[in-house]
């Protein structure tokens, strides 16, 4: 509490003023203690923060006065500003109790583990504000460090409300081109989930204590003794597999998959036009509208808010047709034609474009063509710079503005901005049908098929490619030898990622668990 100034005057004509300053630490401490006691006793509370099964009765004026995050929330005019009960996610209730205690009292007992956890909740504990205050304390001498300091904050994982109302208005990011890029990327992360794979990996990769984890999801596939409908989730930080709810349809091969945010979509397969979405919140599969044409061995990719399926095989001919699914209408429509009909190709979305890499054409010739489909004008062209080899059953991913392509004939990197291909080191065990995903700013290759091998046709190997060292390393094995028909990267909650060991044989050194159960829970999309 600041000192209080008192002014008084005499009643005579010669007015005399006197001032004195009174300060009462006891009153200040008693006020803080009373506020904290009212919070604990739920007295006069006007807002309840709900985290999991825990409720925290609080006072809006104190939260707003003690935390720019809550001030922004309550002043935003959004739904949270009018509700009494506010549910918060992505934060541990124990950590939040410490945050609230600090807001009310200015005190908190710190340990090394708590510091690590609190850093995850940067927007609540004002780590961002601390960085800004440090810069502004000596801006002339410290402005050269501005980008280096602020780039350590993972802006995409800051809430939209706080990002727009506080960070964007601060000016520090707007005064520097690189800073503006950080802000633009954070906004893009929230508004267009389908482009998250285009953002710098160090910004979107969660910290290890973040309550959501990036996972590679492997959907179904072919085993030595037949087909599988299992959905496996792999966490790179634990080198551990867990199991989600199995695929909702009868076992079939050669379907395709893609992800939008944390939702997973699956289409087609042998004699199928079905379309499904996995909702991780409820651990359930939702049925969508059927595609116009049943297809397998096709490409499936998302650009902005639309999902596209391209090419493939309909049991009679190799396809050149393209379909587009609109989320609002849950309908498919024709969206153009490929330059060349193709099946079993690699594919990846990059910006507004979808690249199709290699594959087998209608004359059953394996090609090295690179087709580029423009989703803005629905045109498709063949690039002059072809894939360095003729190959099929390829896998592709985007990492830091480059397209990586892996197959039996080699490992390559394509730079769209320069229109250049680069030959990279082969995997330790060359194979096709690899399940490829970006985790922790690296490429993870799961399983696959050793095409032409006389024994051990299917692989259980897990290999990791590090762009910094330009090398592969072995990182354990999968639960079984197989190749998957779909592999996507998503963020899942710690609870959903699974923790119950699975007894599948061969799970060494990684283990598996069954978090989703085996019964099929379905409803319409």
Image (cartoon, rainbow, N blue to C red):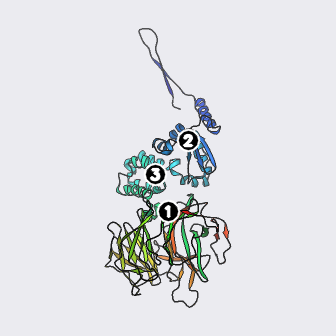
Q: In the rendering, at what x and y percent does residue 390 appear? A: 40, 85
Alpha-carbon span between mark 3 and mark 1? 17 Å
- 210 lies left or right of 10: right
Q: Nearer the viewer, mark 1 or mark 2?
A: 2
Q: Residues within 10 Å of mark 1 (few under 14, many from 20)?
A: many
Question: Is tag 3's residue or tag 1's residue first in the polypeptide sequence?
Answer: 3
Q: Nearer the viewer, mark 3 or mark 2?
A: 2
Q: CA distance from mark 1 to mark 2?
A: 33 Å
Q: Residues within 10 Å of mark 2 (few under 14, many from 20)?
A: some
Residue picked out by circle 1: 205
Q: Position of residue 264 (x, y in %)?
A: 51, 66
Q: Nearer the viewer, mark 3 or mark 1?
A: 3
User: Furthest-right residue in view?
Assistant: 503
Q: Quadrant of residue 225?
A: bottom right
Q: Which comes before the other along the chain, label 1 or label 2?
A: 2
Which residue, given by chain and number where applicable, does mark 3 sit on? 160
Q: Image point 51% across, 31% down: which residue?
A: 2
What's the mark number on residue 6?
none
Q: Residues within 10 Å of mark 3 (few under 14, many from 20)?
A: some
- Residue 477, can we see it? no
Disc 3 + disc 2, Cβ < 8 Å: no
Residue that extends furthest to the bottom in the rendered view of this protein: 454
**Secondary structure under badge 2?**
loop
Pick whichever, 359 or 45, lies toward us: 359
Residue 84 image label: 2
Q: Earlier in the sequence, mark 3 or mark 2?
A: 2
What kind of element bears circle 3? Answer: helix
């Amino acid at each position: 509490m600041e000192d209080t100034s008192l002014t008084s005057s005499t009643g005579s004509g010669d007015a005399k003023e006197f001032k004195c300053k009174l300060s009462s630490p006891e009153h200040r401490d008693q006020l803080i203690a009373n506020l904290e006691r009212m919070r604990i006793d739920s007295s006069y509370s006007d807002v309840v923060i709900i985290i999991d099964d825990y409720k925290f009765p609080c006072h809006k004026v104190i939260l707003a006065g003690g935390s720019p995050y809550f001030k922004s929330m309550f002043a935003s005019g959004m739904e949270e500003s009018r509700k009494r009960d506010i549910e918060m996610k992505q934060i541990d209730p124990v950590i939040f109790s410490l945050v609230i205690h600090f807001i009310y009292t200015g005190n908190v007992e710190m340990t090394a583990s708590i510091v690590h956890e609190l850093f995850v909740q940067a927007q609540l504990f004002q780590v961002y504000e601390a960085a800004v205050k440090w810069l502004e304390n000596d801006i002339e001498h410290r402005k050269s460090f501005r980008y280096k300091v602020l780039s350590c904050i993972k802006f995409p994982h800051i809430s939209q409300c706080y990002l727009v109302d506080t960070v964007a208005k601060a000016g520090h990011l707007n005064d520097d081109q690189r800073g503006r890029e950080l802000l633009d990327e954070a906004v893009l992360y929230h508004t267009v989930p389908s482009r998250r794979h285009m953002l710098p990996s160090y910004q979107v990769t969660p910290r290890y204590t973040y309550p959501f984890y990036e996972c590679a999801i492997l959907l179904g596939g072919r085993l030595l003794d037949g087909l599988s409908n299992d959905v496996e989730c792999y966490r790179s930080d634990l080198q551990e597999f867990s199991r989600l709810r199995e695929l909702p349809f009868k076992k079939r091969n050669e379907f395709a998959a893609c992800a939008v945010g944390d939702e997973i979509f699956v289409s087609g397969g042998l004699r199928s036009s079905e379309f499904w979405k996995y909702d991780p919140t409820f651990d359930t599969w939702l049925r969508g509208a059927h595609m116009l044409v049943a297809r397998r061995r096709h490409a499936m990719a998302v650009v902005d808010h639309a999902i596209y399926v391209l090419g493939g095989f309909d049991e009679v001919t190799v396809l050149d047709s393209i379909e587009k699914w609109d989320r609002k209408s849950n309908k498919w429509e024709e969206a153009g034609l490929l330059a060349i009909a193709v099946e079993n190709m690699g594919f990846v979305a990059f910006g507004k474009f979808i690249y199709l890499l290699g594959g087998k054409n209608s004359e059953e010739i394996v090609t090295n063509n690179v087709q580029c489909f423009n989703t803005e004008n629905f045109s498709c062209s063949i690039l002059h710079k072809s894939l360095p080899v003729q190959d099929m059953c390829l896998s592709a991913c985007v990492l830091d503005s480059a397209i990586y392509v892996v197959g039996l004939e080699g490992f390559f990197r394509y730079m769209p901005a320069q229109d250049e291909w680069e030959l990279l080191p082969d995997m330790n065990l060359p194979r096709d049908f690899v399940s490829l995903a970006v985790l922790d700013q690296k490429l993870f290759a799961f399983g696959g098929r050793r095409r032409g091998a006389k024994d051990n046709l299917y692989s259980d190997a897990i290999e990791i490619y590090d762009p910094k060292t330009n090398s592969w390393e072995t990182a354990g094995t999968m639960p079984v030898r197989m190749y998957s028909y779909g592999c996507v990267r998503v963020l899942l909650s710690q609870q959903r990622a699974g923790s119950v060991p699975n007894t599948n044989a061969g799970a060494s050194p990684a283990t598996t668990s069954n978090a989703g159960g085996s019964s099929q829970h379905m409803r319409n999309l």
